[in-house]
Image (tube, helix red, strand yellow):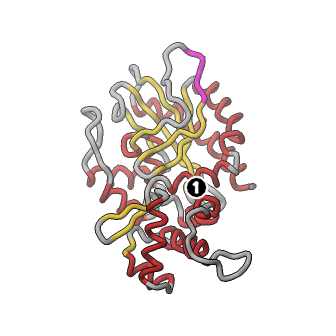
């Protein structure tokens, strides 16, 4: 699964109550508790613990239920679009991230970050965005555009391949080793421009560098002639939960210019946004 951190993903299970209630099929053991729902949430927590794939037998053993009950739980989640069957195994689908976004939206990150995005946009004179990881994509959840005529026009909700976007790379670099290995094993990597890194070993090397540097500068890999520079946003535990980035038409500038002029204000804005996240 495209795991943020296990703790954040576990909150998906807690937020899933309403989504799963209609599909609960077993009779509750107590008047106010649904055992089937409890098991369904426990199943989501199994995935949240870092297990990417589960068979019916795995679920039966780890939840201490019958194989028939495990089958009903998995098929219920599959019916609602939260898991998909691949042979004998079941994996989470990107739809489960909808629950994560509901949790994250409760933090009002786009609203809280807006003044800092506006200030960063005004200082840098470039488009700035906050993005989150959704399986193999980075999704824009907040955006500010400069008033200049020539700009990078991307709306909130826009999805882009994480491997070819600076925001996506800082988010991928923030995954734990197992989650990153799972991504590299399954992600579809295409050559979007002549400069796109589409080799798994080369991407793994680049992400290791991004993790060490604490930022990503990307030039002409998503669209030729466009560039981006991004930094991670972390929560109270130090886990990467989102990314903050600037995107621009490259022109005559090179990577060294971008990092000299844009990295300091970008990191300053990120520190201010993180101070709000960590205070909540």
The answer to which of 35 and 196 lies nearer the viewer is: 35
**Quadrant of the rendering where the N terminus is positioned:** bottom left
Q: Residue at x 70, y 50 (%)?
A: 107
Figure quadrant of residue 163: top left
Q: Residue at x 66, y 60 (%)?
A: 236
Whether residue 242 can be seen here: yes
Instruction: Estimate the x, y position of residue 275 in percent, counting from the top left.
Output: 71, 50
145 falls in the magenta region: yes
Figure quadrant of residue 173: bottom left
The answer to which of 113 and 19 lies nearer the viewer is: 19
Instruction: Estimate the x, y position of residue 260 in percent, counting from the top left.
Output: 50, 33
Whether residue 11 can be seen here: no
Q: Residues within 10 Å of mark 1 (few under 14, many from 20)?
A: some
Can you identify the residue that label 1 sits on?
99
Instruction: Estimate the x, y position of residue 246 in percent, counting from the top left.
Output: 52, 33
Left or right placement of residue 197 versus residue 271 in this view: left
Left or right placement of residue 96 versus residue 109 in this view: left
**Quadrant of the rendering where the C terminus is positioned:** bottom right
**Magenta stretch, overall SS:** loop
Left or right placement of residue 162 versus residue 147 in this view: left
**Number of numbered discs visible in the structure rendering:** 1
Q: Magenta region: which residues?
A: 144-148
229 falls in the magenta region: no
């Amino acid at each position: 699964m495209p795991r943020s951190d296990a703790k954040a993903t576990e909150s998906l299970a807690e937020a899933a109550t309403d989504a799963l209630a209609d599909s609960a099929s077993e009779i509750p053991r107590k008047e106010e508790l649904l055992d089937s729902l409890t098991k369904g949430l426990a199943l989501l927590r199994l995935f949240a613990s870092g297990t990417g794939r589960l068979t019916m037998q795995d679920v039966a053993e780890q939840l201490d239920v019958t194989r028939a009950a495990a089958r009903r739980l998995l098929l219920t989640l599959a019916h609602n679009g939260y898991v998909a069957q691949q042979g004998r195994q079941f994996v989470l689908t990107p739809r489960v991230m909808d629950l994560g976004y509901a949790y994250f939206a409760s933090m009002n990150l786009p609203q809280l970050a807006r003044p800092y995005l506006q200030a960063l946009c005004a200082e840098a004179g470039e488009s700035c965005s906050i993005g989150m990881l959704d399986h193999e994509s980075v999704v824009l959840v907040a955006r500010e555009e400069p008033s200049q005529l020539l700009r990078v026009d991307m709306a909130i909700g826009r999805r882009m391949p994480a491997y070819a976007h600076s925001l996506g790379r800082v988010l991928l670099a923030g995954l734990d080793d197992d989650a990153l290995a799972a991504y590299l094993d399954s992600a579809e990597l295409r050559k979007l421009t002549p400069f796109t890194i589409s080799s798994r070993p080369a991407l793994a090397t680049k992400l290791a560098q991004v993790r060490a540097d604490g930022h990503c500068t990307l030039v002409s890999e998503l669209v030729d002639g466009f560039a981006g520079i991004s930094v991670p946003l972390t929560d109270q535990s130090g886990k990467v939960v989102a990314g903050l980035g600037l995107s621009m038409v490259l022109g005559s500038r090179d990577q060294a210019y971008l990092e000299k002029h844009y990295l300091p204000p970008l990191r300053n804005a990120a520190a201010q946004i993180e101070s709000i996240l960590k205070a909540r």
